[in-house]
Image: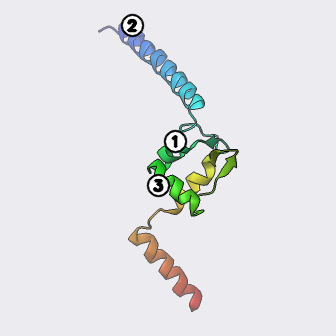
Amino acid sequence: MTMTNQEEVLESIKTMLLGMELLLKQIAGNNPMLSTNSSSFLTVQEASDLLCIAKPTLYAKVSKREVPHFKRGKKLLFKKSDLVNIIEGSKRKTYQEIREESEQRRAKLK
């Protein structure tokens, strides 16, 4: 391969990558599951997909008021940011994080 040929190949790859990036941004903008807009509302199906639980499980959690939701007539809606907070709130701490918290509490008691 000559230097000019390599440059052409690299430029072609760069153009393709930019096109793919634009397509992904377009797809993410049209898909509420991929959107970064945290104020968007999700349907029951979208919420159950995001939480990785079955729809009947989601309905049970809604009836127990374990999941924040809105009701528009007969339709249930969920704020994406609320569901993300639920997911983030269920994070299990590592042993290192537990140790650090324990040390911080002991230091406050002294």
> How packed is label 2: few (under 14 Cα within 10 Å), some, or many (20 or more)?
few
Query: Residue 83 placed where, x, y %?
Result: 57, 52
Q: Which residue is mark 1?
A: 45
Residue that lies at the very extreme toward the front in this rendered image = 74
User: Could you tell me the amino acid type at mark 1?
Assistant: Gln
Q: Which residue is mark 3?
A: 57
Q: Quadrant of the N terminus?
A: top left
Query: Residue 106 placed where, x, y %?
Result: 52, 87
Q: How many marks?
A: 3
Q: Is residue 75 left or right of residue 22?
A: right
Q: Which residue is mark 2?
A: 4
User: Could you tell me the amino acid type at mark 3?
Assistant: Thr
Q: Residue at x 49, y 62 (%)?
A: 90
User: Could you tell me the amino acid type at mark 2?
Assistant: Thr
Give whichever of discs 1 and 2 has the lower sequence position.
2
> How packed is label 3: few (under 14 Cα within 10 Å), some, or many (20 or more)?
few
Q: Is residue 77 above or below residue 89?
A: above
Give whichever of discs 1 and 3 has the lower sequence position.
1
Camera-nearest residue between 83 and 96: 83
Query: Residue 88 placed where, x, y %?
Result: 53, 58
Give the SS element for disc 3. helix
Q: Is residue 87 visible?
A: no
Q: Residue at x 47, y 75 (%)?
A: 100
Camera-nearest residue between 46 and 89: 46
How far is disc 1 from disc 3 in space, using C-alphas? 11 Å
Camera-nearest residue between 40 and 3: 40
Q: Quadrant of the C terminus?
A: bottom right
Q: Is residue 21 above or below residue 47?
A: above
Q: Residue at x 53, y 62 (%)?
A: 89
Q: Is residue 30 left or right of residue 52?
A: right
Q: Can you tell which of label 1 and label 2 is closer to the viewer?
A: 1
Q: Is residue 3 left or right of residue 26?
A: left
